[in-house]
Image: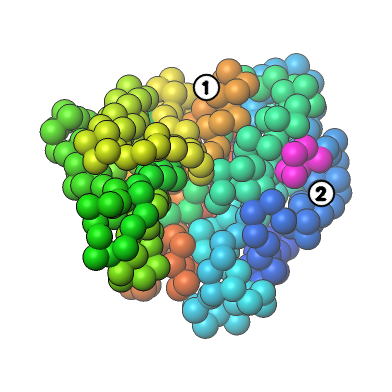
Amino acid sequence: MNAAEAVLAGSGGTTAWQEELYKDLHRHPELSMQESRTAATITERLAAFGYEVKQVGGGVVGVLANGEGRNVLYRADFDALPVTEDTGLEYSSTVQGVMHACGHDMHVVAALGAAELLAARRDAWSGTYIALFQPGEETAAGARSMVEAGLADQIPHPDVAMAQHVLTKPGAGHVGTAAGPVLSAGDSIRITVFGKGSHGSMPQLGVDPVVLAASIVIRLQTIVSREISPSDFGVVTVGSLQAGSKSNIIPDRAELLLNLRTYDTAVREKIVAAVERIVRAECEASGSPQEPTFEYYDQYPLTSNDVETNTVVTSAFVQHFGADRVEHLDPITASEDFSNIPDQLGVPYVYWGLGGFLPGMPVFPNHNPRFAPAIQPTLATGTEAVVVAAMAYLGKN
């Protein structure tokens, strides 16, 4: 029996309280950076398991020191979304307009289950396990908040960091891993361009920012199609264009909201530079009386798995789950802020996918009002995956 099997022995991959806690958290979702009830629940559980618990930047960290060995950090996020639930589940959200539509409740309960199991079988492993629970993932604020609150000085320095996310693929009971990029970097930009207001019947006396903004929108579409190699991934989306309030008034400004997605830092930098170049050039061509402004927000880093760490964890998954339950995870165009933590700490990391839907179930994507992964085997698999990945580094095999 290896270390992971020893820790999981008799648990069936999940503990008796986990399903009820999952339903409780699902009924009581909390928006990003407002998760006081959830944080209190996590704190209470970790303390009961024997962890040294700290509050850091809105998050909760439990440290379990267990002799000499490596330090493993596992992170779970716990915020919900401003979404009105439409699942019809008996444990649906009781908070109007707020829902765990991304599976973070599943992340929390799997991580707490693993934390309990590790605490109960300290004879099977050696080192330090760091159970980190992060707020505010949905607004890209939580990881940054914990780092800025001095996370590095409040925990043993990790040798490796880990995280997982419940997804629509692979199927429930399976996990998906990959080396390199698994989630895209994401950047939102608020761009304001300026014109000169005038009466709609006297366009010659103004500078029309509506026409200027329209020209920018069209020109921006050439970045990916003409400036980025076909072998590279990039997305430039103009999600909003706001200008004016009346048909016969030429306004004095227009606002564009952009979203960028990339899998490569160099590609990201190239797209950002191209956006600013195009906007400035179109403003000059239109005779804009003022320089445009650029506000970057909701910025998510690239999530790119360390090759060696991914190999170690994938091998452990194959040994435990069997090769038929470990799949290759194709890169996902969604974004996450998890990597801000290991990047700031300077440690390698691995991030894997956790299947959430059984064959025959209606599959709705994350952030959908009807997103409802199967509690089992998703919860059991997620709990096992955390234990197995941690024991790959901590186990006395």
Res 109 seen here:
yes
* Disc 2 packing (10 Å; few <14; some 14–19; many ≥20): many
C-alpha distance separating marks 1 and 2 = 27 Å
| Quadrant of image for the C terminus | top right
Position in image of residue 278 (x %, y %): 26, 34
- Residue 235 location, quadrant: top left
Q: Indicate the colouring scheme.
A: rainbow
Q: Residues within 10 Å of mark 1 (few under 14, many from 20)?
A: many
Query: Magenta span has 268?
Result: no
Residue visible at 36% across and 49% down in the picture: 196
Whichever of labels 1 and 2 marks the residue nearer the N terminus, that label is: 2
Q: Residue at x 43, y 54 (%)?
A: 167
Q: Which mark is residue 43?
A: 2
Q: The magenta stretch spans which residues?
A: 55-60
Q: Which mark is residue 377?
A: none
According to the picture, the residue beneath numbered tag 1 turns out to be 348
Tell me, yes or no, if residue 374 can be seen here. no
Foreground residue among 247 and 150:
247
Name above or below for residue 260 compared with residue 211. above
Residue 201's place in the image compared with 317, above or below, is: below
Say which amino acid is labelled 2: Thr
